[in-house]
Amino acid sequence: MHLKKSIIVGYDPGTTAAVAIIDTNKKILFLTSKKGLKVNDIIKEISKIGTTLIVATDKIPIPKNVEKLNNSLGAKIFFPSESLSTTEKWSLIKDCKIKIKNDHERDALASAIKAYEKYSKLFKKIDRVLSSLYLSELYDKVLKMLIKEEAENITDAVEKIMKKMKKPEKSKKKIIKETPNKKVQELKEIIKQKNDDIEILKSYNESLKEKLKKYEEKYGKRTEIKIDINEIKQLKDQINKLKEKIEEKNNIISKLKLFRELENKNYIPIIEISGTTESIQEFSKKFSLINRVVLLKNTNQIETLNDYNIKAAIIEKIDENIIGKLNFPIILKDDISLKKINNILVIEKKEFENKISKARKIGFIKWLKNYKKRKV
C-alpha cells in the first residue's frame, strides 16, 4: 500500500538522546541512544520505519526539542498530566523483551508506551470496525484522520476516504511537458495508488453483496406472508421507534456540525455532563468524547473520564484526594470566561490554551508537588 505503517515515537532529548519507536500493536520497532543525536538524524531514521502518528515525552513542561521534532513530523504530541516517576517508567516497560542500555532509552520507551496506553482503545476499535467491513486496508488512513481530528468518527473517516478515491485525477498534460521523466514517474505512482484504491472499493463492494445475500436468505424469499392486526401494530411501533432514533441522530449530526463551525471560528465547544457514570456512558454513546472539553456539574465519578481520552475537564472546585488520579488536566470554572453561542457553551481557543499551558507548566504541577510533600 502507498501509506506507511503508523508509528508512535518516544523521544528523550539531551546530551545523550534516545528514540523509541513502537507500532499501534505495541510492538517495539526501534530503540537507540547516542550522544549528539540531532533531530534531523532522528527524522531520517523514522522515515525508514513508518509514518509518525504521535510523538511522546515523559516530561512536563514539554522539552523544546520534543516540540521541534513533533512540528517537523506533523504528528500529534503526547505528554502525561505530570512527569512520569522512575517507578512508573519501569512499570511501563517491565514486559518489554528488549535490552535497555541506559535511563535515556528507558525514558523514551516508557513515553511511547504511555502514549499507546492512552489511545489503545481507539486503535482496537478502528481495527475491529474496519475488519467487520472488510476494509482493514484503510486502518492507517482512518487512524491518522481521527488522531488529527480530520474526521468526527470512523464512519465519517471512511466516507471521506471513499469520496477521495472516487474523484478523478486532474489532467497532467501541461506538467508532463515541463519535466517528462519526473512526471511520468509521478503518474505511475498515481496509477498504482488508484489501483490500490480500486481493490479496496471492490473488497468493500463484495462485503456489501455478501451481507445482502445473507439478509435475503434470512428474510427475502418468503412465498406466503401472513400479517394479523397485532403484527401490524408491532410494525407501526417499530417504525415509530426508528423515526425517533433517526430524529435523534439528525439532532446529533446538526450539533456536531455546529461544533465544527464554532471550532473553525476559534472557539472550543464545551460539553455539559452531570458527572454520574451513567450520564457519561450515555453521552459517550451519542457523541465521541475523544479530545473534547467537558464541564462537570459534580465530580463524584470524575475518574470515569480517564477511559474517554478527553482534552480537559472544567469543574467547580478541586478535590485534593482525586487530583493525582486523573490523566487529563482540569480547569476551575471561575478561572475562565464561558459564553453561549447558539445555545452551546464555548470558550475562546486562545484563552483555553493559555489556561491549560499555565496549569501544566506552573500552577498545577507546583501545587501538586507541594501537596505531595505535605502528605509525606
Image: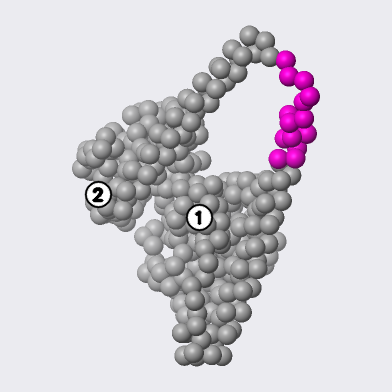
Residue at position x 44%, y 67% from top? 74
Which residue reaches farthest front? 223
Identify the secondary structure beneath mark 2.
strand
Q: Going by the image, does 150 lie left or right of 351?
A: right
Residue at position x 75%, y 40% from top? 213
Q: Going by the image, does 205 lie left or right of 123?
A: right
Tag shown at residue 137: none
| In the foreground, 241 or 25 | 241
Identify the secondary structure beneath mark 1.
helix
Dominant secondary-structure state across the stretch colored magenta: helix
| In the foreground, 196 or 17 | 196
Which segment is the magenta one? 212-226
Tag shown at residue 348: 2
**Mark 1 or mark 2: whose residue is earlier in sequence:** 1
Q: Give the number of callouts.
A: 2
Q: Return the x and y of residue 79 as percentages of the image width and height.
A: 44, 57
Which residue reaches farthest top? 229
Instruction: Give the position of the N terminus as an image quadrant.
Output: bottom right
The answer to whether residue 368 is magenta is no
Q: Is residue 29 above or below residue 342?
A: below
Residue at position x 72%, y 35% from top? 215
